[in-house]
Amino acid sequence: MAEVRSEMTANVWKVLVAQGDTVADGDTLVILESMKMEIPVIAEAAGVLSSVAVAEGDAIDEDGLIAVIDEA
């Protein structure tokens, strides 16, 4: 199991995946927005998303949980 966490305080601008999706290492999961910059959050492991903890428009703190990947 791999947890994907935010590296900064930001707003969730776009969610590109859903629970149950299969992702590859390097796939973009969500795009965060902070100070008018778009920051992609990528998967650091391949597997199936067991949960997506954010929705578009959410505010997320540094180290906040974005998703959980069950590694293949």
Image: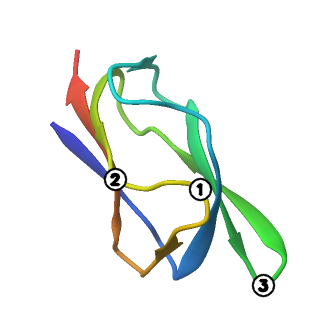
Residues at badges 3 and 1 in contact (C-beta under 8 Å)?
no
- Circle 3 is placed at which residue position? 35
Nearer to us in this view, 46 or 34? 34
The span from disc 3 to disc 1 (Cα, nearest Å) is 17 Å
* N-term mark: 3 or 2: 3
Which element type, helix, strand or loop, lies under badge 1?
A: loop
Q: Which residue does the image show at 43% across and 56% down from the upper left?
A: 54
Q: Position of residue 9 (x, y in %)?
A: 52, 82
Single out the mark in the foreground, 3 or 2: 2
Residues at badges 1 and 2 in contact (C-beta under 8 Å)?
no
Q: Is residue 29 left or right of residue 70?
A: right
Mark 1 burial class by Cα count in 10 Å: few <14, some 14-19, many 20+: some
Q: Which residue does the image show at 61% across and 65% down from the upper left?
A: 57
- Quarter holding the C terminus? top left
Q: Which residue does the image show at 58% across and 77% down from the upper left?
A: 10
Q: Position of residue 34 (x, y in %)?
A: 70, 78
* N-term mark: 3 or 1: 3
Q: Which residue does the image show at 71% across and 69% down from the upper left?
A: 33
Amino acid residing under circle 1: Glu
Q: Position of residue 52 (x, y in %)?
A: 36, 43
The span from disc 3 to disc 2 (Cα, nearest Å) is 22 Å
Mark 2 burial class by Cα count in 10 Å: few <14, some 14-19, many 20+: some
Which element type, helix, strand or loop, lies under badge 3?
A: loop
- Quarter holding the N terminus? top left
Q: For residue 53, which numbered disc appears in the image?
A: 2
- Circle 1 is placed at which residue position? 56
Amino acid residing under circle 3: Met
Nearer to us in this view, 1 or 12? 12
Mark 3 burial class by Cα count in 10 Å: few <14, some 14-19, many 20+: few
Amino acid residing under circle 2: Ala
Residues at badges 3 and 2 in contact (C-beta under 8 Å)?
no
Single out the mark in the foreground, 3 or 1: 1
